[in-house]
Amino acid sequence: MTDCLFCKIIAGDIPSNKVYEDDLVFAFRDINPQAPTHILVVPKEHIASAADITKNNSAVIAHIFEVIPQIAKSEGLKNGFRVITNSGPDACQSVHHIHFHILGGEQMSDKMA
Ligand code: AMP
Ligand code: ZN
């Protein structure tokens, strides 16, 4: 997608603080961190949101959930972490390329919303 912020970050057209990359996945630090560690993990394929996951594209989502524990380990998140994906306006999704927030490095609230 030419008009997608995260597609531009993946392509290197917009700079990012990359923490992980492979053939399918790109991960980088959130520009406005909401925890001491705040990383976004995205598929290189443009999928708009969790509402758009189907049988045909879910393999990359499974792969993301293999990558997440590797990133958490390399970031030293020994005491745990939270994974969030916002989908659609009720969830305040602001970038319409699916992304998984990894949040950690502090004790978080027991409330999620
Ligand atoms: P969401 O609100 O779930 O769609 O999350 C979008 C996230 O993207 C927010 O946490 C933003 O801080 C983050 N973000 C927006 N622009 C950039 C950027 N250029 N580099 C890194 N993170 C960004
Ligand atoms: Zn995109």
Image (tube, rainbow, N blue to C red):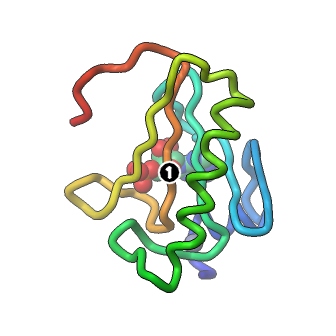
Query: Where 67 falls versus 2 (above or below)?
Result: above
Left or right of 31: which side holds 96?
left
Circle 1 SS class? strand
- Looking at the picture, how far across and down is residue 88, in whole percent? 29, 64
The amino acid type found where label 1 is placed reads Phe
- Looking at the picture, how far across and down is residue 7, in whole percent? 64, 70
Question: Considering depth in this image, is 24 or 113 the residue closer to the camera?
Answer: 24
Q: Residue at x 48, y 15 (%)?
A: 106
Q: Which quadrant of the figure has residue 60?
A: bottom right
Q: Residue at x 61, y 23 (%)?
A: 77
Left or right of 66: which side holds 93?
left
Quadrant into which the N terminus falls: bottom right
Query: Where 70 falls versus 53 (above or below)?
Result: above
Query: Where 18 falls versus 62 (above or below)?
Result: above
Q: Residue at x 77, y 65 (%)?
A: 13
Q: Which quadrant of the figure has residue 105?
A: top right
Label 1 C-beta lies within 8 Å of the nearest ligand 1 atom: no
Question: Considering depth in this image, is 15 or 19 the residue closer to the camera?
Answer: 19
- Looking at the picture, how far across and down is residue 9, in whole percent? 69, 61
Question: Considering depth in this image, is 24 or 48 the residue closer to the camera?
Answer: 24
Left or right of 53: which side holds 25?
right
Which residue was labeled with disc 1? 100
Q: Which quadrant of the figure has residue 83?
A: top left
